[in-house]
Image (cartoon, grey):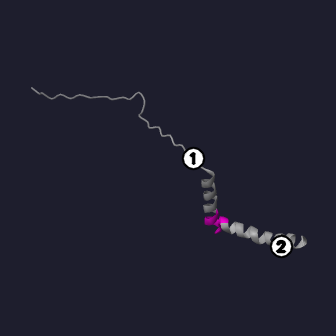
Amino acid sequence: MSNSTSGHVKIAFIKLPTFHFKRNILFTWMDLLVSFGGTLSLFLGASVISLVEVLYILLQPLIHQATNTKH
């Protein structure tokens, strides 16, 4: 007499298990400025200070002219 028994177990899910992630991203104006400055620095080799220096150099003749005409 053989005492061998075998059985099958079937497991079924109604719905596959899933994970939900929620991510809130807060981006301030300072973060935006830093992001643009970093991008400009990376691609153009420029910084916010360099842009201010360029504006100063370009506006310097106008400022000089405005101060000389008041005398």
Q: Mark 2 and mark 1: span between their CA atoms?
A: 44 Å
Q: Main secondary structure of the magenta part?
A: helix
Q: Amino acid at mark 2?
A: His
Residue 6 in picture, x, y percent from top left: 21, 29
Q: Which mark is residue 64?
A: 2
Q: Amino acid at mark 1?
A: Leu
Does 25 lie within the magenta span? no
- Tag 1 secondary structure: loop
- Residue 59 vs 9, above or below: the answer is below
Q: Nearer the viewer, residue 64 or 58?
A: 64
Q: Is residue 49 left or right of residue 17?
A: right
Question: Looking at this rendering, what residue extends furthest in the top direction?
Answer: 1
Q: Nearer the viewer, residue 15 or 43?
A: 43
The residue depicted at 61 percent of the width and 57 percent of the height is 35
- Residue 61 vs 36, above or below: the answer is below
Mark closer to the chain start, 2 or 1:
1
Residue 46: image quadrant is: bottom right
Query: For the magenta stretch, what is the residue range?
Result: 40-48
| Tally of marks | 2
Q: Which mark is residue 26?
A: 1
Q: Which mark is residue 61?
A: none
Residue 39 in picture, x, y percent from top left: 62, 61
Q: Is residue 22 left or right of residue 40?
A: left
The residue depicted at 15 percent of the width and 29 percent of the height is 4
